[in-house]
Image (cartoon, rainbow, N blue to C red):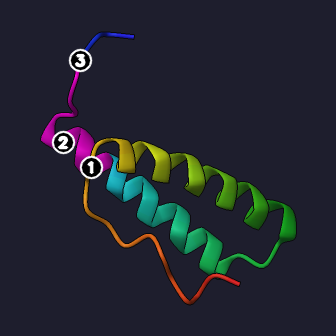
Amino acid sequence: MNGQAELTEAQERELLDCYGALLRIVETVRVPGVQSAARMALAEVHAAVEGQALEFDLYSRRFR
């Protein structure tokens, strides 16, 4: 751990990009194992984003 208290602007963008990429995988991939892993990863990224108080669209009616 580097002791940095806040993300840089570039790090925030990367985190939100990661969230978006995982969300697209969850919405489009129909392989159960991949979809399950992507959802778990999405939950972890959500925790990181929420911990940084960044605004993003978490809830989606597209989730099944």
Q: State left or right for residue 52 relative to residue 44.
A: left
Q: Assign a secondary structure to mark 2.
A: helix
- The residue that disc 2 covers is 10
Q: Is residue 13 magenta?
A: yes
For the point 31% across and 10% down, which residue is it?
2
Q: Tag on residue 53? A: 1
Q: Nearer the viewer, residue 43 or 36?
A: 43
Q: Nearer the viewer, residue 24 or 48?
A: 48
Return the x and y of residue 13 as percentages of the image width and height.
Answer: 24, 51
Cα gap from disc 3 to disc 1, whole angstroms? 15 Å
| Quarter that holds the C terminus | bottom right
Cα gap from disc 3 to disc 2, whole angstroms? 14 Å
Q: State left or right for residue 19 relative to residue 30.
A: left
Q: Mark 1, mark 2: which one is toward the viewer?
A: 1
The 10 Å Cα crowd at callout 2, few under 14, some 14 to 19, many 20 or more, is: few
Q: Amino acid at mark 2?
A: Ala
Return the x and y of residue 34 as percentages of the image width and height.
Answer: 77, 61
Query: Magenta part of the protein: which range?
Result: 5-14
For the point 43% across and 54% down, which residue is it?
18
- The residue that disc 3 covers is 4
Q: Assign a secondary structure to mark 3.
A: loop
Location of residue 59 with respect to 19 vertically, above or below: below
Cα gap from disc 1 to disc 2, whole angstroms? 15 Å
Mark 1 or 2, nearer chain start: 2
